[in-house]
Amino acid sequence: KTPVAREGSTLAFREISLMKTPGEVLPEGYRSRVIIRWGDALFEDVPDFDPATLTPDIAARQFGVNNDFLAFLPLGDDPSRGLLYANHEYPNPHLMWTGLSEHSAAREMTDNQVAVTMASVGGSVVELRKADGAWQPVRDSQYNRRITATTPMRISGPAAGHPRLQTQADPTGTRVLGTLSNCNGGVTPWGTILTCEEGAGEIFGGDWQSAPDHALLKRYYYDDTDNDRWGWTRVAPRFSLENEPNEPNRYEWVVEIDPADPTSTPVKRTALGRFAHEGASTILAPDGRVVVYLGDDWEFEYCYRFVSTHPVRPGGAAANRDLLDEGVLFVAQFEANGQLKWIPLVFGQGPLIPENGFHSQGDVLINTRGAADLVGATPMDSPEGFAPNPVTGTVIIALTSNDDRSDPDPANPRANNRYGHLLELRPPQTVNGRDHAADTFAWEVLALCGDPATPDHATRFHPATSSNGWFTDPDNIGFDPTGRLWICTDGVQPSGHDGLYAMDLEGYGRALPKLFYAPPAGAECCSPTFIDNGATLLLGIQHPGEGAASLDLTPTRWPDFDPTRPPRPSIVAIRQVAGRSVGD
Ligand code: FEO
Ligand code: CA
Ligand code: CA
Ligand code: CA
């Protein structure tokens, strides 16, 4: 049941103070433990972590780098076993190895180092077991698996086989190597993982302007900056637009992974559209169809929703193997009257016709952004976290920022939106819960972020928000088992640090955030995930030490604090020493 406070917040922890430190900052009475770090062995035969002797084969058998999304899936009925899934979004060569410069690493890396970066991104599946109250990875578990930038995958759904997905290596347009820029994600009701490819433009090299599909590349923000950022074209020529002009079209999808079957082939589900997928949060509509909420994390891009054609069937992954291949992708249009209309992106409907360059549903999906442009979708201020509250069924959207906005609209109400905001959507209530498949929702602004003490910021938080509690740039969101909202910011903020904030959504404490956690200097915390009925909070700690020089931070070597080892992105488990639920 959702707690409702008459005064103050229902969140009982003592708020921490803003600070930059080489380590973590937690409220009094809380402890954090590292569960797994970049470079930890998933298998017994893997040598101890040593960046100097890393090879791609070793890296592909270790926990990857820069974990973002994480998920925990119970394993059978045993409360002391589970599977951890984590995304590994991108490499930081200059933090992985000494002697590389931040901006020239692509040139400075050896070919071996380049190949190691390709083996260190993607995802990890790791079995966890609880021993003496602490979750620990199980080496050599039959479930342990690494997904990398070279793992074979299948392409399915309406765009599979499309000529624009065909390459020299794959004339069928249905087989692709690897997944890229895996940011956030989701878990399906049948126990599989959805990992999201959030853009690929910086990975590809070569001349985009002379590519045959250059208008599509332009709409997907290919430009002259940050190309071939990690030197991958040197060891994988398919990442050069001149060699394989269609290769970019094979990324920016949602990929489904069955973590319970380590031999399964991950599948790129084209029905969920192609754009800078931030995440993919799922919920069931009252009739049993699955609804997936999808944000395109870029300034002036859109909020999407997928609704499956068929209801979810009992029987887990095997019974729902192709459920995400059939359904309708919708894009959001926010209206001034507090209504949100979901507009279907279906070939042949409205402007999605050959005269406008759309000859099939595959064309609509490969150029999802172009399709959404034509139907009158509302351009948003960089949608990141976008997820239904499992307790109340309302849907929260975190819009990070958009300082290029000059024309405010009702759902993006500030020009020069440097600080971001939160929206709350209300699908219509039915006797069987909220109807996430309905054509129309209600919506309202939940908070306008920034410093309430600075009138220029024009914030809208609860008036009791403290000088530590305000935040900017909301990114990943999560809900505790009572339906309270937990928000991670998007890296180091104007406040001087990244943080995890919590707020009530009901009662007096609605939109009254409190600062719960600050990660080590330069890191951002990601994907707040509650397990053990709320007694444990799992948190991803991405890129500790990043940007230390420019941010005037003390360089950190968290979590080992060993001068011979780099800082290591990790997953931590946070608990109250007294054992009460996190936040209570
Ligand atoms: Fe990878 Fe949108 O953050
Ligand atoms: Ca993010
Ligand atoms: Ca983040
Ligand atoms: Ca981000």
Image (cartoon, rainbow, N blue to C red):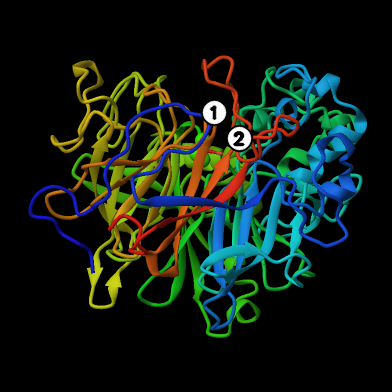
- Residue 468: percent from left, percent from top: 28, 31
237 and 114: which one is in front?
114
Q: Quadrant of the N terminus?
A: bottom left
Q: Quadrant of the C terminus?
A: bottom left
* Residue found at the very far left of the displayed protein: 6
- Residue 402: percent from left, percent from top: 41, 25
Quadrant of residue 293 in the image?
A: bottom left
Q: Is residue 433 left or right of residue 315?
A: left
- Dot label at residue 543: 2
- Residue 302: percent from left, percent from top: 45, 40
564 and 424: which one is in front?
564
Q: Residue at x 58, y 85 (%)?
A: 315
Q: Is residue 562 left or right of residue 376?
A: right
Does residue 296 appear anywhere in the picture?
no
The residue that label 1 is drawn on is 522
Q: CA distance from mark 1 to mark 2?
A: 7 Å
Tag 1: residue type? Gly
Q: Residue at x 75, y 17 (%)?
A: 101
525 and 280: which one is in front?
525
Instruction: Please say if the residues under marks 1 and 2 sit with CB atoms less than 8 Å apart.
Output: yes
